[in-house]
Amino acid sequence: MKFSTQVKPISYLKKHAAKIVEEICETRQPMLITQHGMAKLVLMDLKSYEEQKETIAFLKILALGNCEIEQGQYCSAEEFLATAT
């Protein structure tokens, strides 16, 4: 994701809010808003936000699984299936 094409000052946001919402929802590209030349916030469409949250949750589950493996807290598939039935 490159923010270089989607950087706008906060004054643009104030004047073109409806247009920005339409553009972001259509392109699904986030927009970086600056204030006094400094990056302040990122605007993104709801679907992209939800997908990002789901991805982060999945990555957290994978990281926890890796920690359990490193600590030896696992069993083989055969062992698991034997105890699950």
Image (spheres, rainbow, N blue to C red):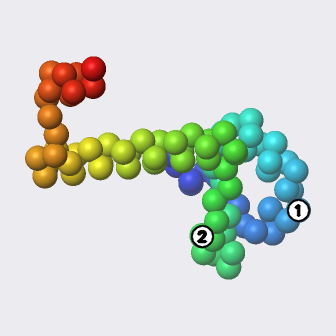
Residue 77 shows in this picture: no
**How many C-alpha atoms fall within 10 Å of the one at disc 1: few (<14), some, or many (≥20)?**
few
Q: How many numbered callouts?
A: 2
Identity, as a three-letter code, of the amino acid under mark 2: Ala
Choose top left, top right, bottom left or bottom right for residue 47: top right
Residue at figure coordinates x 11%, y 47% from the top left: 72
Where residue 83 sits: x, y (%)?
21, 27
Q: What element does badge 1 sit on?
A: helix
Where residue 24 sits: x, y (%)?
72, 44
In the figure, is residue 62 to the left or right of 73? right
Q: Which of the numbered marks, if any, corresponds to residue 40? A: none
Up/down of 70 relative to 77, above or below: below
Residue at figure coordinates x 22%, y 22% from the top left: 81
**How many C-alpha atoms fall within 10 Å of the one at disc 2: few (<14), some, or many (≥20)?**
some
In the figure, is residue 30 to the left or right of 81? right
Residue at figure coordinates x 14%, y 34% from the top left: 75
Q: Which of the numbered marks, if any, corresponds to residue 15? A: 1
Identity, as a three-letter code, of the amino acid under mark 1: Lys
Quadrant in which the C terminus is drawn: top left
In the figure, is residue 2 to the left or right of 81? right
Residue assigned mark 2: 39
